[in-house]
Image (spheres, rainbow, N blue to C red):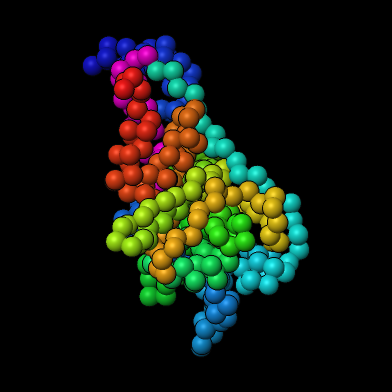
Amino acid sequence: MKKLIVLGFFAVMLSGCNTWGVIFSPKVDPSDAKGEWDAVVPLSLTSFSDGGHGEPSVWSKLFDGKAEKYTGLCKGNNAGAAGVGVAVAAVGGAAWDIAVNAANSKVDEIKAKSMNTWSATWAVSVADVKATKCVALVRYKKSSNEFTNPQMAILLHLKDFEGGKAFQVIPLFILSKTSIALTKDEGGGQGTVGLSIAVAQASIDGEELKESTGEAVTVGGVVVKENGENEIGSALDVGMAKADNSMQGSKPIIYPKGTDVYLKFAITETGSLSGDDAKSKAELKAVTDALGPIAKEALKKRFAPDNGD
């Protein structure tokens, strides 16, 4: 047994420093998503009003007073101080150069835990989507008072494109506590993850179901800690309080011709131990998870090697 341990040690050493770092570096464990719920929360004017009996507003429950500069934009009056837009960031990752099967198996296990997706849906009229300036995507722990303990709250602006013929998904603000992805502990029990966000829509055109999606948009540097260690939450501004054409967002999504639409938002959380190509993989995963199994097969065929037919 001792010989096997020594051989395993040298195998990892010979396979490269990155392998050693991935396997033995301190990590921030992912949150157990089994006890969590996911939701799309359209933000209307009533979302900013306090409830009865001293109950805080939905806006306050979600963002805890940390996203106030976006209230004008999300209420629809386009007020608020102009800010400098932060470009969506790539997700950092470790380099992979694995030559030993035993080490490779362990790294693959860590890598698999370093990318996880959650999703939420919204069935609504097209007119209501056009009237909604912002939505919140929320991963939260269910309690008697909904949204009192959000673990990840993402504020998105639905920006008009081409005179209201289409819309773009633009991240504005993120309040984060935990992640469902494993990531490296960068000190003090704290790590960072990337978020890739995609939205797919389905609608009826005559007798036919039509599906479409925009490209995923990715934000990096989202700070997380282990469950129970980050109750205040970490705030990250990634947008501007006043809409203009410099906002970083998704590819435009054309509104359907019908009266109703089904929207599915997929969010892939990616830890910093997930590999060189983490960003492209996370964005593809977010898009395919939003579209569903039929689209996944279509994408596989699209990206399959050309057989010369």
Residue nearer the viewer, 26 or 34:
34
Say whether residue 284 is left or right of residue 251. left
Q: Is residue 19 above or below residue 201?
A: above
> What is the x, y in percent for residue 175?
55, 57
Q: Is residue 228 above or below residue 95?
A: below
> What is the x, y in percent for residue 2?
27, 15
- Majority SS type along the magenta span: helix
Region in magenta:
99-118
At 65% from the left and 44% from the top, the residue drawn is 87
At 54% from the left and 47% from the top, the residue drawn is 251
> What is the x, y in percent for residue 60?
56, 71
Residue nearer the viewer, 211 or 95:
211
- Outermost residue, left side: 1
> What is the x, y in percent for residue 249?
59, 50
At 71% from the left and 61% from the top, the residue drawn is 242
Residue nearer the viewer, 241 or 274:
241
Q: Is residue 275 above or below residue 73?
A: above
